[in-house]
């Protein structure tokens, strides 16, 4: 993307990866519109295997140790995603619920008025909004944070356990250069 003065202000690589293959994305610019077309066929595929970070330094002695390490990394990543998704969703949902509930607090009657009768209606609405908004925010955090993290962690797990074991000697030779 270019600014009015012709300076480049943004850009991205015009390719995408599927496993160990990279495919180009063809671009056609017409005025202020760009059309991007993925070239997803064997004729355009380039084989570029991806090495795992530090695989030449890994302490795995066999496939079982590698699988265990990959499983532990996956479960840890999913747990962290769940923690962040739940916390962020609950806080954001609770805050939004408090604001919305407080604004509509005057409309509350029944059980809430009985339970919190000594409090102003805005505070009663905020309490009800926090309960509902926090719950909905938690669900949203799980859908929009935890689920994508879990999918990415599972993909990394299967990539790790399905690739050939790294050649330790090759990694050691590269470190000496």
Image: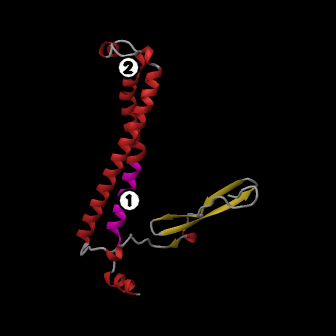
Q: What residue sits right under mark 2 in the picture?
A: 124
- 158 is within the stretch colored magenta: yes
Instruction: Please report the residue visible at 42 percent of the width from the left and 19 percent of the height from the top.
Output: 122
Residue 158 in the image, given as x and y percentages of width and height: 34, 62
Say left or right for 140 vs 31. left
Q: Say which residue label 1 marks.
A: 155
State the image quarter where residue 130 is shown. Answer: top left
Q: What stretch is highlighted in magenta?
A: 147-163
- The image's colouring method is secondary structure
Upstream in sequence: badge 2 or badge 1:
2
On-image quarter of the C terminus: bottom left
127 versus 164 height, above or below: above
Q: Which of 157 and 124 is in front in this view?
A: 124
Front: mark 2 or 1: 2
Q: In this view, does 154 lie to the left or right of 105?
A: left
Answer yes or no: is residue 165 visible. Answer: no
Q: In this view, does 159 lie above or below 132?
A: below
Residue at the image position 38 percent from the left and 19 percent from the top: 124
Image check: 69 left or right of 137? Answer: left
**Crowding near pointer 1: few (<14 within 10 Å), some, many (20+)?**
few
Callout 2 secondary element: helix
């Amino acid at each position: 993307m270019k600014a009015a003065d012709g300076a480049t202000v943004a850009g991205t690589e015009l390719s995408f990866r599927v496993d160990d293959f990279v495919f180009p994305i063809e671009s056609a610019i017409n005025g202020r519109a760009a059309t991007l077309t993925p070239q997803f066929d064997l004729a355009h595929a380039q084989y570029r295997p991806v090495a795992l970070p530090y695989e030449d330094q890994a302490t795995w002695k066999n496939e079982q140790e590698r699988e265990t390490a990959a499983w532990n990394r996956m479960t840890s990543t999913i747990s962290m995603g769940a923690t962040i998704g739940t916390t962020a969703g609950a806080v954001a949902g609770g805050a939004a619920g408090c604001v919305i509930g407080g604004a509509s607090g005057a409309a509350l009657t029944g059980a809430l008025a009985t339970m919190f009768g000594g409090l102003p209606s805005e505070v009663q609405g905020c309490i009800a909004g926090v309960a509902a908004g926090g719950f909905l925010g938690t669900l949203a955090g799980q859908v929009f944070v935890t689920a994508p993290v879990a999918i990415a962690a599972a993909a990394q797990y299967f990539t790790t356990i399905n690739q050939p074991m790294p050649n330790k000697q090759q990694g050691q030779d590269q470190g000496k250069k």
